[in-house]
Amino acid sequence: MTIALIATVTPKPEAVDKVEALMRELTGHSRTELGARRYDLFRGTDATVRFHVFEIYADEAAVEAHRTSPHYTAFRAAVGDLLAEAPVVVSATPVDTAE
């Protein structure tokens, strides 16, 4: 069953550029994962900078493979002290999609 994740990451103001660079690197690696159908990075337009990632995976096994991948675990370790708050991740399954 297809699974979509929407993740929001809020960097500390002084770490915006560093977090964006780390997220761009993560995005590049994540797009090559088996079972990853989509991995898109967005930057919010509010005064507080937030990054949003829209992810689509083939199934729960693909999500778990992403979460245990070397690039994801390295990202989590590198970004920890750079965040203003804990990341928020919402999981969903498709109801009516264009693809």
Image (spheres, helix red, strand yellow):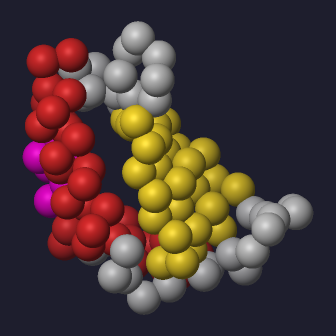
User: How many labels, in total?
Assistant: 0
The secondary structure making up most of the magenta span is: helix
Q: Based on the picture, tell me whether residue 88 belongs to the magenta stretch.
A: no
Q: Residue at x 26, y 27 (%)?
A: 11
Q: Quadrant of the C terminus?
A: bottom right
Q: Residue at x 58, y 68 (%)?
A: 56
Seen in the picture, residue 99 relative to 97 is either above or below; the reply is below
Q: Position of residue 47 (x, y in %)?
A: 41, 11
Whether residue 72 can be seen here: no
Q: Quadrant of the N terminus?
A: bottom right
- In the displayed structure image, the side of residue 84 where residue 88 appears, left or right: right
Q: Residue at x 61, y 79 (%)?
A: 59
Q: Position of residue 72 (x, y in %)?
A: 26, 63
Check the image and name the residue furthest to the right: 96
- In the displayed structure image, the side of residue 84 where residue 86 appears, left or right: right
Q: Nearer the viewer, residue 48 or 45?
A: 45
The magenta segment is 74-79
- In the displayed structure image, the side of residue 18 where residue 72 appears, left or right: right
- In the displayed structure image, the side of residue 69 where residue 77 appears, left or right: left
Q: Nearer the viewer, residue 14 or 80?
A: 14
Whether residue 64 can be seen here: yes
Q: Residue at x 60, y 81 (%)?
A: 58
Q: Position of residue 28 (x, y in %)?
A: 27, 68
